[in-house]
């Protein structure tokens, strides 16, 4: 085997061009999905305190926003809704004129080619803040499934391109697939939040959509951060139920999970660079403690290196600008 001094690994690091030529992983704007928080009402553009640069936007603000996203070359947005009314069964999630249903229609009208991905869950719409129906203080799996299916169907009817269930109920991918197929939506893909952990990194998001659980926590349905074999079983289950794209969430503290899923399954894999990961970078950058641009690109490169094909990130607009000027 060749060794030093014949072998010099620094030879290929001498210039920018040479480094680019041998680069193994690259972050591309075309891999990114930009999340948007849509609030019912009009004239609203309210910055989220723990997520500088990210806003709650009312439906009328969306055309302007998505035109910008599309111009930057970002292929998709992921929608989260903030309804005016919440109730025990999250009826605003599947109301035909709900905030997300309105948002889908207006986005598809203003920028038809932009992919709309819609988060399918009940927690933004339930008064108790849980992702499913609560029966005797416990989130009931089977009673939640028809409501998730109804929600996904109402998104499809409004014109969404991809549905993304994030609730972590067992059997929801099958239930949603069956409902969509039964109503003629067999071509709408399901991006399932397959391995979603009960993480403290979601707290800025819960502030953004006002979905902090009113009692208990989400540990009876989201995964224990200690487990990785279980993540493979979750992914296997969702694939067997008909998921088209699978997701690991959060990303940074779970890069090993992304790698294991990548090596085990030949499905498109998304990773969610979640709100708390965004907030940490922003807080440090605002203090001048870190270089935001370099840190973000390094983080997203790590997520790709771990094996993700798609990255959902609040940094997407900034990243697309940075990648342009490089
Ligand atoms: C809803 C949902 C959450 C996120 C995406 N969909 C929050 C949660 O499960 O509590 C988190 C996104 C983020 O933190 O950026 N089920
Ligand atoms: Zn939820």
Image (cartoon, rainbow, N blue to C red):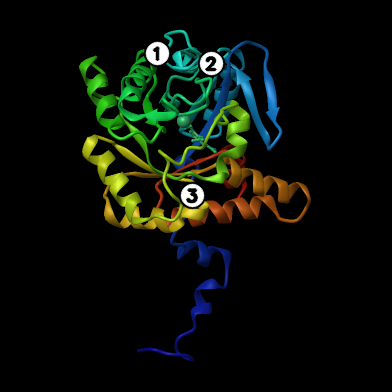
Q: Nearer the viewer, residue 3 or 129?
A: 129
Tell me the number on the disc at residue 251.
3
Q: How many marks?
A: 3
In this view of the protein, can residue 211 be seen by the observer? yes
Q: Are marks 2 and 1 in contact (CB under 8 Å)?
A: no
Q: Alpha-carbon neighbours of circle 1 within 10 Å: few (<14), some, or many (≥20)?
A: some
324 vs 27, left or right, is right
Point out the tag, 3 or 2, that comes first from the N-terminus: 2
Pair 3/1: label in front: 3
Residue underneath mark 1: 158
Q: Residue furthest top?
A: 97
Point out the tag, 2 or 1, that comes first from the N-terminus: 2
Measured as percent of width and height from the top left, residue 69 is found at 55, 30
Q: Alpha-carbon neighbours of circle 2 within 10 Å: few (<14), some, or many (≥20)?
A: some
Q: Is residue 109 above or below residue 293?
A: above
- How many angstroms separate mark 2 from mark 1 (CA)? 21 Å
The quadrant in which residue 84 appears is: top right
Point out the tag, 3 or 1, that comes first from the N-terminus: 1
Q: Nearer the viewer, residue 2 or 190?
A: 190
Residue underneath mark 2: 86
Label 2 secondary element:
loop
Pair 3/2: label in front: 2
Taking the spot 41% from the left edge, 32% from the top edge, the residue there is 167
Taking the spot 35% from the left edge, 18% from the top edge, the residue there is 156
């Amino acid at each position: 085997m060749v060794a030093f001094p014949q072998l010099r690994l620094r030879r290929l690091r001498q210039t920018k061009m040479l480094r680019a030529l041998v680069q193994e992983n690259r972050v591309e704007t075309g891999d990114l999905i930009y999340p948007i928080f849509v609030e019912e009402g009009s004239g609203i553009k309210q910055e989220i305190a723990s997520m500088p640069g990210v806003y709650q936007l009312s439906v009328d603000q969306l055309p302007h926003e998505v035109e910008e996203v599309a111009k930057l070359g970002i292929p998709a947005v992921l929608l989260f809704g903030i309804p005016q009314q919440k109730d025990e069964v999250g009826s605003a999630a599947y109301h035909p004129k709900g905030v997300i249903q309105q948002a889908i229609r207006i986005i598809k009208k203003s920028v038809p080619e932009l992919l709309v991905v819609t988060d399918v869950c009940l927690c933004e719409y339930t008064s108790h803040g849980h992702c499913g129906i609560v029966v005797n203080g416990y989130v009931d799996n089977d009673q939640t499934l028809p409501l998730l299916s109804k929600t996904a169907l109402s998104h499809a009817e409004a014109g969404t391109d991809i549905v993304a269930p994030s609730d972590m109920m067992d059997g929801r991918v099958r239930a949603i697939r069956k409902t969509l197929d039964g109503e003629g939506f067999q071509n709408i893909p399901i991006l399932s939040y397959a391995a979603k952990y009960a993480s403290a990194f979601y707290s800025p998001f819960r502030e953004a959509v006002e979905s902090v659980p009113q009692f208990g926590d989400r540990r009876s349905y989201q995964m224990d951060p200690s487990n990785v074999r279980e993540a493979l079983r979750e992914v296997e289950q969702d694939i067997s139920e008909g998921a088209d794209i699978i997701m690991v969430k959060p990303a940074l503290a779970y890069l090993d999970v992304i790698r294991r899923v990548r090596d085990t399954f030949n499905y498109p894999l998304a990773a969610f660079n979640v709100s708390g990961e965004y907030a940490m970078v922003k807080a440090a950058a605002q203090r001048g403690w870190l270089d935001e641009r370099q840190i973000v690109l390094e983080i997203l490169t790590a997520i790709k290196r771990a094996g993700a094909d798609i990255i959902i990130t609040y940094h997407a607009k900034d990243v697309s600008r940075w990648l342009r000027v490089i």
